[in-house]
Image (tube, rainbow, N blue to C red):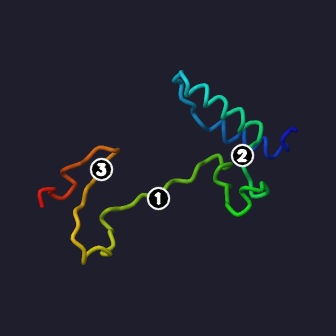
């Protein structure tokens, strides 16, 4: 069954903005299979049964919405009454300079 033109166009417009990795191996096979399924089914909309209570519009926007960034200078004092240590990881790597002294 062919996709409606509007859904097909929205899917292709969104896919055109993505840069696919060039690595090979098993991930390329899985990625190609997933891409074929997306092209066959189209990106979800609220008219699709499984998505009717969500808002998947951001999936079909050409420009993806920016993620909110947590600003550590505006931390709320919710744990002021609790003993705690601040442990900071940057890109998955422990940052001892931004963390509290762990010998406490």
**Viewer-closest of 31 and 56:** 31
Residue 23 point in image, percent of width and height: 51, 24
Mark 1 vs mark 3, foreground winner is 3
Residue 24 point in image, percent of width and height: 54, 21
Residue 12: quadrant of the picture: top right
Locate residue 69 relative to residue 58 in the image: left or right.
left
Q: Which residue is mark 3?
A: 89
Q: Which residue is mark 1?
A: 68
Residue 104: quadrant of the picture: bottom left
Q: Give the residue drawn at x 30%, y 50%.
A: 89
Alpha carbon distance from label 2 to label 1:
24 Å
Tag 3–tag 2 contact (CB < 8 Å):
no
Q: Give the residue drawn at x 79%, y 46%.
A: 7
The residue positioned farthest toward the right in the image shown: 1
Note whether 41 is above or below 75 in the view shown.
above
Residue 43 point in image, percent of width and height: 72, 46
Locate residue 101 relative to residue 87 in the image: left or right.
left
Q: Earlier in the sequence, mark 1 or mark 3?
A: 1
Q: Which residue is mark 2?
A: 43
Q: Residues within 10 Å of mark 3 (few under 14, many from 20)?
A: few
Query: Which SS class for mark 3?
Result: strand
Q: Give the residue drawn at x 61%, y 30%.
A: 30
Query: In which quadrant of the rendered image does the N terminus lie?
Result: top right
Alpha carbon distance from label 3 to label 2:
34 Å
Tag 2–tag 1 contact (CB < 8 Å):
no
Q: Earlier in the sequence, mark 3 or mark 2?
A: 2
Q: Give the residue drawn at x 74%, y 45%.
A: 10
């Amino acid at each position: 069954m062919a996709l409606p033109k509007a859904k097909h166009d929205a899917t292709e417009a969104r896919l055109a903005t993505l840069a696919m990795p060039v690595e090979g191996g098993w991930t390329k096979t899985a990625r190609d299979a997933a891409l074929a399924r997306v092209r066959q089914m189209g990106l979800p909309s609220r008219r699709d049964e499984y998505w009717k209570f969500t808002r998947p519009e951001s999936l079909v926007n050409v420009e993806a919405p920016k993620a909110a960034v947590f600003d550590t200078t505006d931390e709320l004092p919710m744990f002021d009454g609790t003993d705690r240590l601040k442990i900071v990881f940057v890109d998955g790597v422990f940052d001892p300079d931004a963390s509290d002294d762990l010998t406490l």
